Each structure stands twice: as C-alpha cells, then as structure tokens.
Amino acid sequence: MPATKKEKDQAIAELKESFSNAKVIVFTEYRGLNVKSLSALRRKMREAGGRLIVSKNTIATLAARETGLEGLEPFLTGPTALAFGFDDLVSVPKLITQFDKDYKQFQFKGGVVEGTVIGKDDVRNLAELPPREVLLAQVTGGFQASLYGLVNVLHGNIRKLVYAVEAVREKKAQEAS
C-alpha cells in the first residue's frame, strides 16, 4: 500500500488509467480469501483480458472522481478489489460471478459498464449474456434468415410465372390440335 505522497499519486494515476480504459469494472469484497485464491483469480483475470487491483478505498474514490465517475461510494467500503475488463463487457463479470459461486466468502458489490454505475443484479445479468462471438452469430443468422425468406418469395413469383406460361402453352397446343 502506498505510504508516501509520491506513491499515492502513482497509485491514483494507475487507477485513473484503468478507470479510463476499462469497458467494465466490478467491485468485489475479498475478505476471507487466502493469497492462493486471490492469486488464482488474478491469473484467470489476466487470461480473460482483465486485471484485478486491490486498492485503498480513498485512493479508488479519488481516482474515480478524477475520471468523472460518481456514485461509487457504496461499493468502496471494506476491503475492496477492483476487477477491470478491457476487452469485452462479459468475460470479467462472468469470471467474477463464477468465483463468487466457488468461494462463498468472496462477494461482488456492483460495477460500472462504460461509465454507467450498475448494481449487483445487473452484474449478474451481464454475466449471463452469451459471449460476443455468439451474439454476432445470432445477429448474422437473423439477417441471413431474412434474406433466405426474400429469395423464397421472389423465387415463388418466378415459379408461378413459369407455371402460368406453361399452362398457356399447353392450352394453345390443345387448341392447335
């Protein structure tokens, strides 16, 4: 933990950078976790494109205010660790909620999604979303289904025209005979 003014300023600057660059932030209480469990969470967080920082609440509050984030005071009580997600909105909340299920003493308090403060239930809902690739595939599938429907409709009209022309040809062939 920072002891001198220079170290505090450096810690605030580091948190400001993380607050500014993060797409999602989840505030957690790590009371009761041992170092091994916390290290495992940090490792999983790095693999998911995130970062876990244990910080003093006053330093986190100052950094948040300097980046324009307000309303975080309810989350910054007790021993707090901040989980930052830089790549996407889903992977870090998903990891945190899974860790919450595995370790009963670990809890998450709430979070921030692209500058908007959200509650604990919203973090849980965010974690239940499918990954970005799956969502993109679903959207693409929706577009593709619409295009197939249009092709079928157009093809049906052409098919009816061919049947009508064929019926006229057969009728003329019968009249000629």
Image: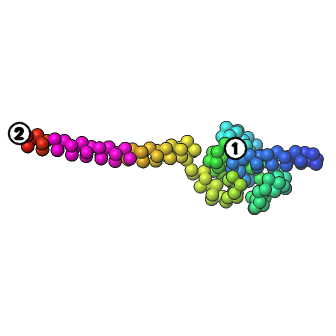
At label 1, counting other C-alpha atoms closer than 10 Å, the crowd grade (few under 14, some 14-19, many 20 or more) is many
| Outermost front residue | 176
Identity, as a three-letter code, of the amino acid under mark 1: Phe
Q: Are marks 1 and 2 in contact (CB under 8 Å)?
A: no
Residue found at x 70% / y 58%: 117
* SS for dot 2: loop
Colouring scheme, one of rainbow, by chain, secondary structure, one colour: rainbow
Assess whether residue 162 is covered by the magenta stretch.
yes
Q: Is residue 2 left or right of residue 115?
A: right
Q: Which residues are magenta?
A: 150-169
**Residue 79 visible in the shown view:** no
Per the image, the residue denoted by label 2 is 177
Q: Is residue 17 above or below residue 66?
A: above
Q: Is residue 22 above or below residue 122?
A: above
Residue at x 37% of width, y 44% of height: 151
Residue, disc 1: 86
Q: Position of residue 108 (x, y in %)?
A: 69, 54
Mark earlier in primary sequence (1, 2): 1
Quarter location, residue 7 = top right
Instruction: Report how far apart the C-alphas of labels 1 and 2 lie in the structure.
Output: 80 Å
Residue 156 in picture, x, y percent from top left: 30, 46
The label number, if any, that marks residue 153 in the structure image: none
Relative depth, front residue between 165 and 117: 165
